[in-house]
Amino acid sequence: MPLPNRVRPDGTLTADPARGLFFGNRGGRFHDPDRREVPARIQATQHWLCCVLSFKGRRRKVWGHGYTELFFCDEVTALAAGHRPCMECRRRDALAYRDALVQGLRLPETPLFPEIDRILDADRRIGRAKRMHRLPAEELPDGAMLLSESEGAFLALRADTALLWSPAGYVALHPRPKGLATVLTPPATLAALRHGYQPIWHPSAEALAPSQARTGRNFYPPGSVAAASSFQ
């Protein structure tokens, strides 16, 4: 049985057979290692990371007595939930994300990552609830994730389309919405996306509409397929 450690774009956890392209954590352990479930807490610290599945041959017993391992369909999903690239296993991406965020937020100095985590924490949640943002859809960058309130579905913006999200990838194509939208991706990350940060998309995004011009990257992180068998 899969553990409830798959992250949805709204930051909540669910059990699903799909393992996705990335895993990560929220700064430590917040699950119950004996019951293999999550109590009321949603994080251990403000450091919400998105990591590669394979790094330096490390192997872990998932949801043991270490930190709470989480899994994401792709980086677009992780960013929507409020995570950022890990500085240890994804150093190049973490620095690119920070550079784009600094430009997007017009920060006078380049912050250390704990300060970025504080900015993201204020953007992504109100207590244990996901913070939503009502923003004009026309002004949103590719890679932004929306909540379709009428359908209860998640939609990722890409070119002139909105891709219907599922734990195993994107399953349908919709027209890009207009007017005010309910946005899940934190404003700080939206600023980074607007200023050049290119997240990694699940290959299903390209499969749905391969002929359209795209931004973002479409590949599995190195070692992801080989590493999948290491995790639950």
Image (tube, helix red, strand yellow):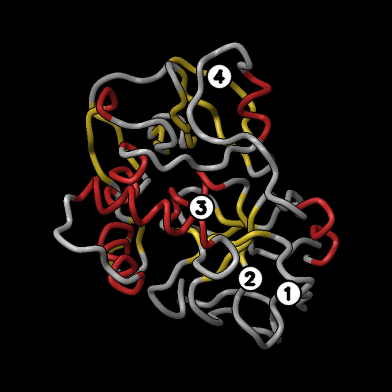
In primary-sequence order, the first of circles 2 and 4 is 2
Q: Name the residue under label 2.
A: 69
- Marks 4 and 3, how far apart in space? 20 Å
Left or right? Give the position of 12 relative to 35: left
In primary-sequence order, the first of circles 1 and 4 is 1
Numbered mark located on residue 173 in the image? 4
22 versus 73 height, above or below:
below
Q: Name the residue under label 3.
A: 78
> Measuring 50% from the left and 42% from the top, which residue is drawn there?
199
- Marks 1 and 3, how far apart in space? 18 Å
Quadrant of the image occupied by residue 108: bottom left
Q: Which amino acid does label 4 sit on?
A: Leu
Q: What residue type is labelled 1?
A: Val
111 versus 169 height, above or below:
below
In primary-sequence order, the first of circles 4 and 3 is 3
> Measuring 36% from the left and 40% from the top, which residue is drawn there?
193
> Measuring 41% from the left and 43% from the top, which residue is drawn there?
197
Which of the pair 147/121 is nearer the observer?
121
* Position in image of residue 91 (x %, y %): 52, 62
Q: What residue type is labelled 2?
A: Glu
* Position in image of residue 128 (x %, y %): 36, 68
In primary-sequence order, the first of circles 1 and 3 is 1
Numbered mark located on residue 62 in the image? 1
Left or right? Give the position of 18 relative to 74: right
Which of the pair 127/78 is nearer the observer?
78
Q: What residue type is labelled 3?
A: Ala
